Amino acid sequence: MKHIVFLRVLSFLAIFAMSWTSASADQLADEFRASKLSIYGTDFGYLDRESVNAMKSKQLMVSIGGKWVMLDQIDVNQDKIEKACKENAIIFTVLDEYSFSRCWSKEEISDVYVNKAGSFYSIRGAYKARIDGRIAALDATGKSVPSRIKEQAVSSILRYADRESVMVPYSPNVLLEISMSDGFPLLYGRCSK
């Protein structure tokens, strides 16, 4: 009996998998067209990389300024969003046509993002200010902190002094950042005014 149930479940899964992967040529073309339009902003033929990169950079720079919250750090409901926007927002500030800064609202430390190409950014972390702050916090404990602990703290900060990320406007109010150092996708949500 268990064998028959297992075979039925296996058959169902096989049929489901085949139906999920088999798409008509029209469905594939529609899916490809929608993806191309979403990523490149057009569904026309050959795309010039330089033009697409310039368009993507401008698209981000026009929309990034303002207060945002990191969606991976909150439950997504109205109360939590409002609280995070008041207490723990991230402020993106456009510096010029090629760069912007990211600063936590409760810190005065900013990372600077400089456009390398299209959606690809080099990030210069404010490592010196972070090191000074971490050492001061360790010293403020009133205990003698071993030098190896301080060295480990400095080392962990320096590891992220220079980074690279891909920045993609996911929607008008959601920004996706994918770090090249660890691949973790960060989602930012725009705070309402």
Image: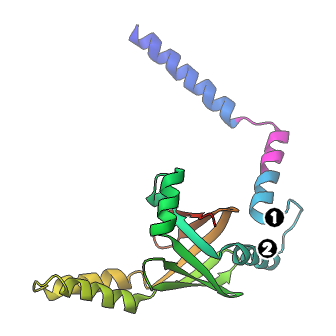
Residue contact at pointers 2 and 1, CB within 8 angstroms: yes
Quarter of the image for residue 92 reads bottom right
Viewed as shown, does residue 76 lie left or right of 62? left
Q: Secondary structure at mark 2?
A: helix
Quarter of the image for residue 117 reads bottom right
Disc 1 residue type (three-letter): Gly
Give the tally of numbered discs.
2
Tell me where residue 10 appears, x and y as whole percent.
51, 22
Viewed as shown, does residue 141 lie left or right of 27? left
Furthest-left residue in this view: 144
Furthest-top residue in this view: 1
Q: Nearer the viewer, residue 84 or 185?
A: 84
Indicate whether residue 148 is drawn in magenta: no
- In the rendered image, the vertical position of residue 192 relative to residue 80, given as above or below: below
Tell me where residue 167 appears, x and y as whole percent.
62, 71
Chain part drawn in magenta: 22-32
Q: Give the spatial CA distance, label 2 vs label 1.
A: 8 Å
Report the magenta stretch's main SS.
helix
- Where is mark 2, residue-wise? 52
Disc 2 residue type (three-letter): Val
- Where is mark 1, residue-wise? 41
Crowd tier of the residue under label 1, counting other residues whose Cα lies within 10 Å: few below 14, some 14–19, many 20 or above: few
Which residue lies at the image location 89% right of the left edge and 62% below the top edge? 44
Which residue lies at the image location 89% right of the left edge and 63% below the top edge? 45
